[in-house]
Structures are given as structure tokens and as C-alpha cells.
Image (cartoon, coloured by chain):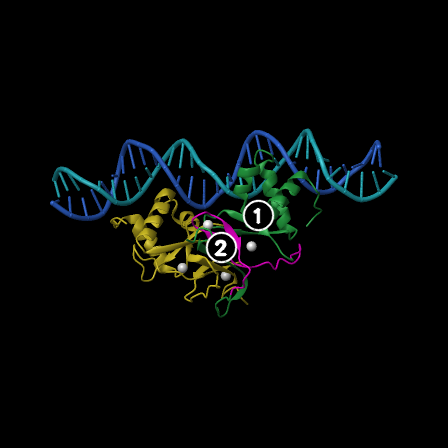
Chain colours: A green, B yellow, C cyan, D blue
Amino acid sequence: MGVIRKTKAVEVLLAAFDTKAVALSAKALIDQLGTTFNKTTIYRVLDKLEDDGVLHSFLGKEGLKWYAKCHGCTSTAHHDVHPHFQCLNCGKVECLAVSVTLPKIPNRKIEVSQLLIQGKCEECFI
Amino acid sequence: MGVIRKTKAVEVLLAAFDTKAVALSAKALIDQLGTTFNKTTIYRVLDKLEDDGVLHSFLGKEGLKWYAKCHGCTSTAHHDVHPHFQCLNCGKVECLAVSVTLPKIPNRKIEVSQLLIQGKCEECFI
DNA sequence: TTATTATTACAACTGAGTTGCAAATGTAGA
DNA sequence: TCTACATTTGCAACTCAGTTGTAATAATAA
Ligand SMILES: [Mn+2]
Ligand SMILES: [Mn+2]
Ligand SMILES: [Zn+2]
Ligand SMILES: [Zn+2]
């Protein structure tokens, strides 16, 4: 959806997702980069990167919006659907590279689904 | 968690969940009952009913909070975990009386999970 | 009926996310 | 390299679901 210009904001945000292999919330990115870039810019860049199939988004436990890198998506085909894991101890959110078996639901057309699993992550699980 | 008094607000809210067998968002309840009761009251009664194991809550697609009746829960044991279905056409949200098979995730302790399935409901699915 | 305590209304607040717009900047084409 | 122009940015103001403090009110037990 539209041209992506190699602006400073796009560069820095993409770098953030490259260094950490986890999901990042818009709020966390604003906390971290809010003095360098305006929060509106951050929201809009994330939005655009999602439109372009670079990032995908989902809602975390408190209704906050989270983003993570897509693998093999394009602006027309967002087939990067997988469950997410949120650590209730450290707050970290990860994409799970597994497929979910949805329950059978008669007489309904399933279009999307989102599974959020919460618990203790590898580091916090003693 | 604390005594529940049979107040007008509790009565009316419980009645709302009895007549319709679907989930209701706090927002919808305020739209509907906001002239009769203050929105703060509605939020607080819903909160308390959840604490008492009468209702359970979850987040819908836009991050709105939804509530539905529990079956066999108490204030100490909220074992009413099941997926929810939200119709993308009419907005209706239902509890699905099925169990979800969670994917295997090594080295992590799963505590909670929430699955939201979206699509077309029985009425909207032509 | 009265004392106690939970519940309510109200108004003010919170905070993630959005919007409109003018200024700044990236990029294609000359 | 320069120019034109569409895209992107910062800013300030806004939205709106949900929260908080508090004084008044209502349910319940004694
Ligand atoms: Mn993901
Ligand atoms: Mn339910
Ligand atoms: Zn953790
Ligand atoms: Zn429907």
C-alpha cells in the first residue's frame, strides 16, 4: 500500500525489530523512541509497515497493540497467522512458529483467529 | 470477593445476560443502560460479578471488554475457559462450548490462553 | 428502627491511539 | 545537480473506553 520511503523513522523502527527477535508494543517503542520521533510518526510507520506486509500486529493482554516481523507476507497476502506467547512475569511477547488446530464450529465461516497464550517464558520459568 | 447486594443495577445487568445468551460488551451495556445507571456503576458491577464467578470477561477484536455468563465458576475457581466467536458482519460475540487443543510449547509454563475466532455467524453466513 | 457498610452518581481524570494541517523531506525526472 | 511534487513528519488538539476519589444513598444485619 503505497511507496515506502527510506526515512529515518522507518530505518530505526525496522532496526528495532531486527535486533530483537520478539514482538514489540507500540507503547514500548514510543517509550523508547518517543524523544527521537513523535508518537504519531511511530504509530503511522508501524501502520504502514503492516499494510506493506513487513510487520503483523495483534492485541496483547491489556489490549495494547503489538507488532512483530512477518515472514513471507506481502501487502496483498498476510498469511502470517500464528499464536503468540506473552510472559506474565517479564512481559515479553513472542511469535510461536506452530500452527493451531481450530475447533470445529458448524454453520459458521471462520475468517481469522488469534490465540494468545500466557504464562512463564523460558527465562522466567525456573 | 465481598457480599453482593441485590441492587437495581445488579438485577438489571444480570437480567441482560439472562435474556440474551450471548456475550455483551461493557460499551454496549452502557449504550443501552447508560441513562438508567451511571457508566461507572456498570463497570464496577461487571467487575464485581466477574470477581464473584458470575461472569467472565475477555477482549474482543477492537480491544473492547466483553462479558458473558459463567457456568460452574466460583470466586476462587474461574475454570470457564473456552474460545469466543465474534461475527465480523453483525458484531455478535458468542462463547463456544468446545475445548481448545493448545500447541506444544517447550520450556514454558502455560497459565492462561484466549482464543478469539472471527468470521460470519450462523445468521450472517448465507 | 438504627447502625454499619456496600453501592451509587458525579465529575474529573488517564492514556493509548487518532486526526487535521502546515512544514519538512525523500525521490523521480529533467 | 537541481527541481517539482507527493509522501512523511511534528505538533497540538482530540477521542473514547475505562478509572479514580468522594460524598450521598441504599441494602442489610442487629
Ligand atoms: Mn507474530
Ligand atoms: Mn465465554
Ligand atoms: Zn518472561
Ligand atoms: Zn453475525
Q: Position of residue D28 (x, y in %)?
A: 19, 48
Three-letter amino acid code at the position of disc 1? Lys
Three-letter amino acid code at the position of disc 2? Phe
Q: Is residue A12 above or below residue B111?
A: above
Of the numbered discs in the image, which one, if any, rests on residue A48?
Answer: none
Q: State the SS at label 2.
A: strand
Tag 2 residue = A85
Magenta run includes residue A85: yes
Where does the magenta region start and end? A73-100
Q: Position of residue A87 (x, y in %)?
A: 46, 51
The Cα–Cα distance between marks 2 and 1, rounded to whole angstroms, is: 15 Å
Q: Is residue A35 above or below residue A118?
A: above
Mark 2 — on which chain does it sit?
A: A
Report whether residue A111 is seen. Answer: yes
Q: State the SS at label 1.
A: loop
Magenta run includes residue A108: no
Q: Position of residue A4 (x, y in %)?
A: 70, 46
- Camera-nearest residue between B108 and A30: B108
Tag 2 and tag 1 share a subunit: yes
